Structure formats: structure tokens, C-alpha cells
Image (cartoon, rainbow, N blue to C red):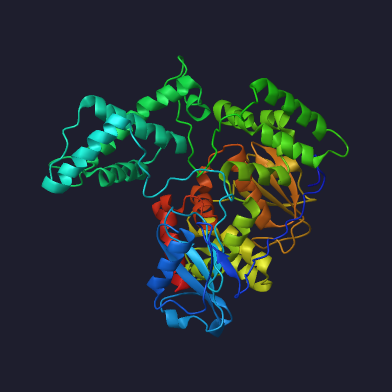
Amino acid sequence: MLSGGKAPSSAFGPNPEYSPHAEVIHDAAASCPLRDGYQAPFHRNHPPSVDALCQVLRANLGLRGGFILQFEDPAFKDQLTNLTDIRDLPEERATLKVLFTTDAACSDSTLDTASLPSLSSGESDSQHWPEPFPIPEFSHDVELTLQEANGRYAKYGSVLMIPKGMKTDILDTLADSMSKISPYPERQHYENVAKALVEKHPSLKEPGCGKGWYGWFHSLKFKLGNYRQKLSAAGCPEVRVNKRKEEAKGPRMKKSKKGEVHYCPDPPEGLSDEDMEEKRRMMEVEVLKKEPDHQQIDELMSATFSKRRKEIVGHQPLIGDVIARWPAMFCERQVRAEFKRVVSTDLLESFLDGLDELAPRLLEVYEAATKSAKKPALKAILDCLKKDDTNERRRTAALLGLPHYLREEPSDIIRMCDAHGETLAEAMEGMQLGLLIGYEGDNQDPFPHEVFNVAVVVEGTVVLHNFKDVPSSFAMLLGIIYCVNLEYPRAMKYPFEFLQRVVMKIKPDQASARVHGIRNKLLRYNL
């Protein structure tokens, strides 16, 4: 807490400490449960090449999309090194890291070549776009027609002249399947579905069209637009939230923009809006108790998730109104839980693990950028780090240097203040969203040697505080942005996008050109 002002106290007292997860290395002699459920031993003999090893991983673990392999190289003190020659692997045991380069997977996995664990089907309850897209079965008469037409195509190369009713049936069926994954597909999703359709039923290819599926691509876009109207009328929350009011002039579309998996979910089966409101009131009462039941609060927050997202996404309330209605959400425990419900990823683990992986290369990139003397603020951060080079300070330097490297101005988002020399009101003046880093005593450095308190500020209100390090508070700020459905601040749009897409690997394939550029530099420094 900063002197001269009073920050709201947490309902749960001190924030629970973060315990980093331990990496599990499996026994080399163990058998590995494969994806299809059978048990089969994984022998010590290496595949003959890196490509052959990739094929083993794809076949046994169901990995899709592009990825590169890294291994812990004993010659370089077990530092991760890109695997380009199978002969580079250690003889006895090798630990591989799979780095996905497409949206086929948004996280990396640590695998042991001596025992390959199965991928758990229960890690996430979300639905992701499959590639290739599984074309559903159409009505019986359409399937019979397509079967006969596909035979003629294989024999004579003739395509089907599609009756209007049949095309409508095909588009309706595809639209229904696509909307179950997301009612707002992106361009590449439409393309994947159109490609998969003509690959399964080549008689549906368009004559005179090079790709053979481009017309289906446009038809699907129009069909999904009409289908969303039906979903809205049926009460689908994610679509209904965008229903235009008569007095509104085209409000901005509310849809997942930051990789949210459960953006505006359907209510739980068997729970009415009145039931969820009653549970919300129970949560309010429990939070006010001197010793609240955390387990009960967890259950109540989970049960009311749909209602909360509907209010936050649909009505866009002020932060004060959100705190008044959902006071339990504003503590570290519940921010992490809410973030996992929205994104299906653990907030602190994915943030800190990704940061630890990238921090050494980020600092190298920063060092190279300061040689031209064009980034004095970035150089000051690196000079400050040299005075006391610890892992936590390396994390802090990597985070605080990011906006300066990306040519952004962070002064309205990240502020330092003397915890006993300034009032809270003075320190937060004009802050709409950001971190307030408090220190004790005199500090002339870009970031303090010891942090007294870090607070997360939204709309001039302290929503979280009592953090003792900058990296964890950065993760909490990102978590609050997702939980309250805020946009990234314009002054630090690209640093936050970098944290999302590169550090946490949430929708990494949709990075902007600037973020894609720094990611490529980091890859070059890893070679």
C-alpha cells in the first residue's frame, strides 16, 4: 500500500504465492500410452533422420501443423539447441522440446524420446479448428448423389451441375458444423472448409476455377452471416451480444479478438438466469465473511461464469460496477481461475515459463539495438540490470525494455513511485490501465532494486495489489485485461500483443508485422 492513499483490501488477505510447476521426465524403460489407447514400448534406437522422428511424433501423438525440434545438448550445459541432424542426439537419453510454428497447437510440449507420453484429452474442454476440417455427412439423398457424381469424376473428370436445393443443403450442414466451433470463423477457416469439401467430394469442384473451391469459400461466408441471424434468434449468447439496437448506429462487433476460447459461453445446462443470480448473491455474502470459504467461492464463480461474461461483454460496465457485482473476482486466485475459463491456459505458468524461455534472447536483442545509441531508455534498463543480474531482474528488464524496443511510450501504463513520498491519487493521476510500481527510499534507476508493492490499476482504481515482483504483476495485468474484456492500451499495443502471441503462445499465427519481426529476430538469435 502506498502512503497517503488507501487501496482496497483483498477479500482473501495476502495473495497466494506462486509455485512453479515441476517438469516431469518419464522413465526411459517405461512403455508409452499412445493416442489410440494401445500400449507400446518406445525403443532406444533413434529413427534414421530428423524427418523420420517428426513422422513418429505425428503418428504416435497426433501432432498437426508445422513444428521444429530442440534438444538439451550436453556439450552446451543442456542448453536447448535446434535439432538438425539425428546424430547430434545423446546416446543414452534425450529430452526434446516441440515448438509449434502454426496454430495447430498453441503451446509447446516437453517430450522424452525414451518414453513419449500420450496427450491428455482432458487438458482443455474447448473446441479448436481442426485441420483438415472433417466434412460432415449430408442428407441421405445428397450423399447418394455425391457418391455417383464422384464416381463419374474419377472416370471421366466431369463435375456435378449442383441443383439449388442440394447446394443449400450442403451449405446449411457445413454452417451448422462450423458454428459449433465458432460462429465467427476467420478467413483461413473458411478456406480450410472449402478445400476439405472439394477434396472429399471432387465432383463439387468449380469448372474454370484454378483452385476449384473459391466459389464455395464465398458461399460459406454468406451462409454463416445468415446462419448467425438464426443463432441470435435462438438465443446464442456469443451472437446475441452483437444484436443491434434500434437506436444504435452499427455498434462495434463483439467477438473474440485475443484468442479467447470461451468468449461469451452458453449458460450451464439446468441453470436459469435466476439460479445464477442467486448464486451471485451467495458469492457476495461469502466474500464479506472474515474467513470466507475459498472452495465455495470457486464453485460459485464457476457456476456464474456465463452470466458474468454476458454482462461484461454485452454491457461493457465500468470497472467500479464490475467490482460491486463480482467482488470475488479481484484477487490473484480468481483472476487465474477466470483467465483459465476464458482462454483454457494457466495464466502464471504460461506467462512465466514463456518469459524465462525468451528473456535471454530478448536481452541480447536489446543489447544489439542499443549499440547505435538510438535507444537511451533501453540502454539505461540494461545498465541497471548489470548492477545486479538475477533471474527476477532479468525478467523485469525483459518486460520493461519491451515497449522501448518496440518504439512505444510506456509512461502512462507503467509508473514508478516512492511508496512514502507520494499519495496514491498523485501517483495514479491520469492512469486508465497499467501498473503502479512502488519502491522505498531514493531510486534513480529505471527500475528499483527492491519492489515494495505493485498495484494493477484500471480506470483510476486499484483492482489488485500487494505484488512483490514486476513479472507476476505483469501477468495479473494481462489476466485482468482478459477477465474484464478490455482492449490493449494504444500506447503499448504491440508489447501486449507480443506477450500474448509470443510469450504465452495464444493465437501466435495472427501476429502483426511488428511483432512478427521481433519474433523472427529471436529465432535467429536461437540458431
The residue positioned farthest toward the right in the image shown = 290
Count the marks: 0
Could you tell me which residue is drawn at 14 percent across and 40 percent down? 207
At which x and y percent is residue 380? 59, 65
- Quadrant of the drawing holding the C terminus: bottom left
Asked which quadrant contains residue 352, the reply is: bottom right
- Image: 295 above or below 77: above
Could you tell me which residue is drawn at 79 percent across and 41 percent down? 294
Could you tell me which residue is drawn at 75 percent across and 62 percent down? 450
The residue positioned farthest toward the top in the image shown = 246
At which x and y percent is residue 246? 45, 14
Q: Is residue 10 visible?
A: no
Q: Is residue 34 visible?
A: yes
Choose between 144 and 169: the one closer to the eye: 144
Could you tell me which residue is drawn at 40 percent across and 38 percent down? 185
- Image: 406 above or below 493: below
Please state if 243 lies on the left or on the right of 324 as rendered.
Answer: left
- Image: 46 above or below 322: below
Choose between 282 and 385: the one closer to the eye: 282
At which x and y percent is residue 370? 50, 68
Choose between 408 and 502: the one closer to the eye: 502
At which x and y percent is residue 217? 28, 38
